[in-house]
Amino acid sequence: MAKKVNKEWEDFFPALAELEREKGISEQAFLETLSNALASAYKKQADIDASGTVEVRLDPEKGSIRYFMHRVVVDDEKEELEDGEIYLEDARLIKKNIKAGEELVEEFVPLNFSRIAAQTARQVIFQKLHEMERDNTINEFSDKEGELMSGLVRKVDMRNVYIEIGKGQIEGVMLPQDQVPGERYNAGDRIKVFVKRVRSGGRNAQVLVSRAAPGLVKRLFEEEVPEIKQGTVLIKSVSREAGRRTKIAIASQDPRVDAVGACVGNKGARVNAVVQELGGEKIDIILWSENPLEFIAKSLSPATVVSVTQVGEKAAIAVVPDEKLSLAIGRDGQNARLAARLTGWKIDVKSESAAEKLDLGLTPAEETTDAENFDTPAEEEPVSSPEGTEE
């Protein structure tokens, strides 16, 4: 006969469905966890004569909790009982026909199951609950690293921003280094974030999200430009200083498709949509080239580049007109720095007059690219976001 559930637990079963709905934890998994927790708690405070394996059966339909003791029957000749054993003679007082070697399962009422034991059980339950939430988070987001997601800002403290993402069950954390300087985040704001990674540590799992990662710009362009999503236009590389400027290198897989035009859109609609999402951040769209020296020249745009000379392994000197030197280097070196990250080369930018004084002496054609060899004049690339051609 099912035993009535203790008053402390009478609200538990009606809450199971709500728990599954809110936390995404299956009722069956939670019942198993609860059974183990109650069994463990009772075992700790049970009398030594009641030693054995405790099983707790929960029936949410009947609202009942039943306790069973599992023990192995041993011959009466055995000198000393081990944990989980019972003598045959004692076992037959409970079940007449039982034999040595069989398992005796006996239902009992835990009269001494104190509040302390129940509290211990709840502590174990909450621990398992955290573990389940962590596992659910990892399972749900393990394949979403590198993806773009929309979220609702839930809370902002002095350092971190907490964002509700996914189905509203998961909280993403945006650390200070992943926030864009100058951007303000307020509770209730809906923003787009880049999922950097899912971090599992200790009892919790964290979904680390970013607004400053270069990957955010890449995903935004994929969202706005069908040719990128279809694979006709490829994003070859992205370099970014969040809140200030981004350079994005693209290439067309189809000679009939203008990669730059596809990214810019009609009257700049596509690139402007990305710029607006980034709060006005300047974006340079650069046509990628298989020739690394030509690519370097394009990456330094909006400055005009006279020539690029390789001076070592992935190291080059770019020569620009004297009046374009400051534009090529950029404020605080930003333009040259972003170009170096975009191309993966170390770039030393020099004016024409400085290059003449140095007399570098590196003239072989295979080591030098000049403006006359470019497929498109340097000043026409990249296409930038509005007001994006000047620092």
Image (spheres, rainbow, N blue to C red):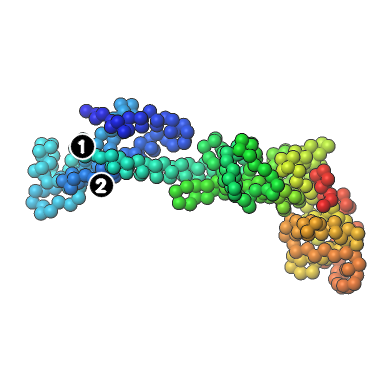
Q: Residue 349's spot in the image, x, y percent?
A: 82, 63
In the picture of the structure, the residue carrying the numbered disc 1 is 111
Q: Nearer the viewer, residue 265 or 242?
A: 242
- Up the image or down, 85 lies above or below 321; here it is above
Q: CA distance from mark 1 to mark 2?
A: 14 Å
Left or right of 377 in this view: 130 = left
Residue type pointed to by label 2: Lys
Left or right of 225 in this view: 6 = left
In the picture of the structure, the residue carrying the numbered disc 2 is 44
Query: Can residue 97 be seen here?
Result: no
Query: Can residue 179 be seen here?
Result: yes
- Residue displayed at 22% across by 28% down: 1
Q: Is disc 2 placed on a helix, strand or loop?
A: helix
Residue type pointed to by label 1: Leu
Q: Residue 7's spot in the image, x, y percent?
A: 30, 31
Dot 2 surroundings within 10 Å: few (below 14), some, or many (20 or more)? few
For the residues bearing labels 1 and 2, Cβ distance under 8 angstroms: no
Left or right of 144 in this view: 231 = right
